Amino acid sequence: MDVKLPEGLEAFLAAAGWGDAVIEPLAGDASFRRYFRLRLGEQSAMLMDAPPPTEDPAPFLRAAKWLDANGLRAPRILAEDAPRGLVLLEDFGEVRVREYLDQWPADEAEVYRAAIDALVELRRLPPGPFLDYSLAEYQREAKLFVDWYCSARGLDVDAASYSAAWEEVLSPMLPRQRPGVVVLRDYHAENIMLLGSLGDQGLLDFQDALVGHPAYDLVSLLQDARRDVAPELEAQMLDYYLSKTGAGADFTADYARLGAQRNAKIVGIFVRLWKRDGKPRYLDYIPRVWALLERDLAHPALAPVARWFDANVPAGLREAGGGSWQP
């Protein structure tokens, strides 16, 4: 693990009153950000190192402050030096939903209902100070599948018809994401912390927030790339969300649209993490994500994209859950 401390850290911590803290490096994520836990007597805090130019903490700070101001449980900002990429945060502890449910699976429904309650609250709030989740952004993300997965497989695919298929699928949905809700975009069991009870949950990794469709974060939660969520639980939680929000008849079709878009994007991202960033462990998640993608493609709303997959991605790769990899 890289234990080189960020430049300027000593002065930053001294100014924040944490100059005598013990610093413990933590395992990294899929980005170039690093995290450290600070201990000062009985107190603890988290340090985010998001160094420019590869990282920029400003979007995180903006989203954290908006969430906190609106009653949602983001880590409180204790100190910040955005030009250096340093942020001192409230420590949410070490109990992530993912590991908790690995140990206590009987609590799964209760934990997921609480996570959905946060999305229901987001739906009630006016859109925050974030950019719109535009068709161009959906297309950019979906194209990661072609750029990275298809390229890695040596597939000569029709990229123009891929984009056209997504436009046909997503365009009917766009009017239904107006005026929109704040979409955290990476809302899943590894980014939700338990803070003392199953219903007291903290949010992480929301720096890419946009204003978009309320189904997006629900898909992120229930079609989790890193954790198996049984189809029965997914259906139960989708029904719970619908009962709490009164979402209309088009919602489940939009849920499938965004599920397919998100899962195609994630397959591309996980291949990119291997090919570009030297992180082959993300390839292990692709069969799960691929299976979710196939389920979404079976929805009638995805027919144009499903036809593209039938014409461009060989059945042998699809049957193998995206194919085996030999990094």
Image: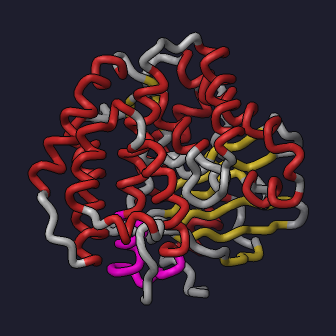
Left or right: 283, with 297 as reference point: right
The residue under the point 51% across, 46% down is: 206
Nearer to me, 128 or 287: 287
The residue depicted at 78 percent of the width and 60 percent of the height is 99
Residue 231 in the magenta stretch? The answer is: no
Q: Is residue 104 visible?
A: yes
With respect to residue 241, does 11 lie above or below? below
Point out the residue furthest to the left here: 160
Residue 84 on image: x %, y % = 43, 65
Q: Main secondary structure of the magenta part?
A: helix
| Residue 76 location (% of width, % of height) | 65, 44
Q: Which residues are magenta?
A: 268-281
Q: Is residue 104 left or right of residue 112?
A: right
Give above or below for 317 relative to 164: below
- Tell which of 180 and 310 is nearer to you: 310
Q: Nearer the viewer, residue 48 or 249?
A: 249
Task: Identify which residue is drawn at 26% across, 44% down.
Answer: 305
Q: Residue drawn 50% across and 51% down? A: 292
Q: Position of residue 54 (x, y in %)?
A: 34, 68
> In this image, 196 relative to 281: left or right?
right
Snapshot quadrant of residue 212: top left
Measured from the top left, where is residue 176 in percent x and y? 35, 18
Q: Nearer the viewer, residue 71 or 10?
A: 71
> What scheme was used to colour the molecule?
secondary structure
- Is residue 58 depicted above or below 270 in this figure? above
Q: In the rendered image, is residue 84 in sight?
A: no
